[in-house]
Image (tube, rainbow, N blue to C red):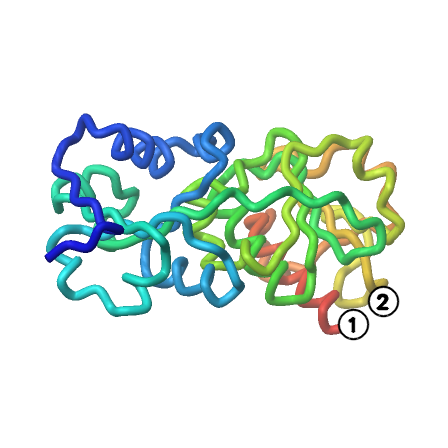
Amino acid sequence: MISPSVVVIHSRDNAFVKDLRRLAQDSTAYRKQGRVWLEGDHLCRAALARGQTVSIAVFSESFWPLVPVEWAQAAPKSIVLADALFADISGLESPAQMGFIIDLPVGTALQPDEATVVLDRVQDAGNVGSILRSASAFGFRQVVALKGSAALWSPKVLRAGMGAHFALDLIEAADLDDLRSLRVPMLVTHVHEGDFLHRTPLPWPCAWVLGHEGQGVCAALEAQAALRIRIAQPGGEESLNVAAAAAICLHASGAMR
């Protein structure tokens, strides 16, 4: 017998299904709805581990009889979707069969003295999510995404971040003026110019600025930088992917703590 807190849905035209489809497939729908869709076991576990409150738990119909107690009790309301509906909504090639909806975390004010990562129009969702993961791993608590960067809470960025979102203070749609309040040294990455990373004493805390995949860091931010840093590439490649460069630079900074 289904408890009153569980609703089973088979119709594509259901209002909840339409909203969930937007959350799962539209990269900025979370801004309009004020909530975020987390699909899959790993993201859901990461959210719970970091103290996130789940509003609604969603399960595929075939998975519902197998749902562990902790999933069934994670939210005050559970929605069970027909398998075909869940597959239609899912952003994964192999739908995960379960997910959580959480309220969009309230944005925090920029902390001037916090170790920070600044995203300057980094547009690829996979790159952004990977950078968030590196930031969390290497002790950078604050991430500031300038306008033109990928939406931080989009489904693709969430999947690439692997739960790092819940360990970070995220600031979206910032502009250059917002960065003026930072009191930590600003370091920018550069392909061909600047000091080699492996030879340079790095300040801590600091703010690493990571630029657009094709254009790099904008001139205005370069002008504000305390250091311009390049990564030695003895193999001779012209440049590194921005997420790979971020992991190298943030690890080097974290080792200086």
Q: Amino acid at mark 2?
A: Pro
Among the two numbered marks 2 and 1 on one chain, the one whose residue lies closer to the N terminus = 2
Q: Is 69 located above or below residue 235 in the figure?
A: below
Residue 81, located in which quarter of the rendered image?
A: top left
Locate the C terminus by quadrant.
bottom right
Are the residues at dot 2 and dot 1 in contact (C-beta closer than 8 Å)? yes
Alpha carbon of mark 2 to alpha carbon of mark 1: how far? 8 Å
- The count of marks equals 2
Residue 192 falls left or right of residue 86: right
Residue 184 falls left or right of residue 247: right
Q: Going 22% across and 50% down the picture, which residue do you hit?
A: 4
Q: Going 77% across and 59% down the picture, which residue do you hit?
A: 196
- Tell me if I can see residue 41 in this picture: yes
Q: Going 73% across and 53% down the picture, which residue do you hit?
A: 116
Q: Is 101 located above or below residue 34 in the figure?
A: below
- Tell me if I can see residue 237 in this picture: no
Between 6 and 94, the one nearer to me in the picture: 6
Between 73 and 218, the one nearer to me in the picture: 73
